[in-house]
Amino acid sequence: MSPLSAARAALRVYAAGAAVILAQLLRRCRGGFVEPVFPPQPDRVAIVTGGTDGIGYCTAKHLARLGMHVIIAGNNDSKAKQVVSKIKEETLNDKVEFLYCDLASMTSIRQFVQKFKVKKIPLHVLINNAGVMMVPQRKTRDGFEEHFGLNYLGHFLLTNLLLDTLRESGSPGHCARVVTVSSATHYVAELNMDDLQSSACYSPHTAYAQSKLALVLFTYHLQRLLAAEGSHVTANVVDPGVVNTDLYQHVFWGTRLVKKLLGWLLFKTPDEGAWTSIYAVLTPELEGIGGRYLYNEKETKSLHVTYNQKLQQQLWSKSCEMTGVLDVTL
């Protein structure tokens, strides 16, 4: 990618982020963000990917506080024990555990699913939260570009491997739910079906935005498949906003400076960033309803191309080839 093209890609991503930050600032000036309140959720089981840090940690803690059995899927073994102990202590819920899952490795994902299924427990909620952001060009263990391989393909495979358990766990009036975390950067993304790995011309901004666009397309097609089979499982996608987490190591230095100086005002806290995921998991308003894009606990429109069913199917079929998942065509 030429320096000019890379600069344009970066500008589009930062412009999208700036627009979200401005909206968040206006919202904060008008009273701020309000935490959704839900009743206890005993006897329900949730898996949260990336639950040792940031939004994922806050999501896991909130669900544990409501009495859910929470399984944190992550690759940070050294931190996991401390995180689990802290959540148990703060929520007074002993049903919190960690299972190792490296979303950059299909072998690790399959091993995680095997270990989960050995437990012989239901699965009512799957939150696809983990991800990397604007990292230098590098590959997963399976040879995929890391944004596409970890952010998207890892969750594609994980979700498909857990669908049978989700189907068994859902029931009329109590659907199991798949909630996937995307980003406003998907609005400035393009899906290059001829080069999903960004091998011809790499830009971390383009690759990150594409992975978030792919997650929206994946969610919409998954919901169509679930609805067609009459399954008691729904799939929705959420946008957490611009959140003050540790994902900004590789962004433009000016953005890091703004985050350091004004993050408390302009950025959402990790707790606030988790609220839309929690809403998507628990609100009665979404019972039996999927294929929605949610921002600040409200449905909104995603990029127009995400509603293109032909593109959804093309990406799904290509992803099945890459992961070895059986393709189902509507």
Image (cartoon, helix red, strand yellow):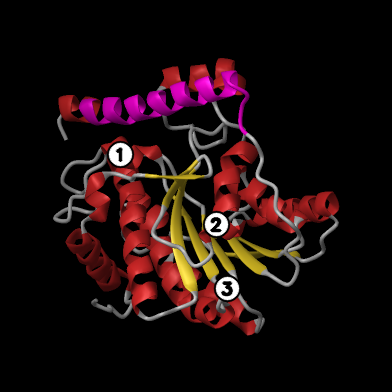
* Crowding at mark 2 (Cα within 10 Å: few <14, some 14-19, many 20+): few
- Disc nearer the start of the sequence (1/2): 1
Label located before the other in sequence (3 or 2):
3
Q: Is residue 199 visible?
A: yes
Let me know if residue 137 appears in the view.
no
Q: Position of residue 24 (x, y in %)?
A: 51, 26
Question: For the magenta stretch, what is the residue range?
Answer: 8-33
- Secondary structure beneath label 2: helix
Q: Is residue 111 left or right of residue 185?
A: right
Residue at 19% from the left image edge and 65% from the top image edge? 314
Q: Which residue is mark 2?
A: 285
Number of numbered discs overlaid on the protein picture: 3
Pointers 3 and 1 in contact (C-beta within 8 Å): no
Q: Amino acid at mark 2?
A: Glu
Query: At x 54% / y 25%, what residue is drawn?
Result: 27
Label 3 element class: loop
Q: Is residue 93 magenta?
A: no
Where residue 136 sits in the image (x, y, percent)?
36, 39
Q: Name which quarter of the figure residue 302 lies in.
A: top left
Disc 1 to disc 2, how far (Cα)? Answer: 26 Å
* Residue under pointer 3: 173
In the image, residue 227 lies at what x, y percent?
A: 38, 73
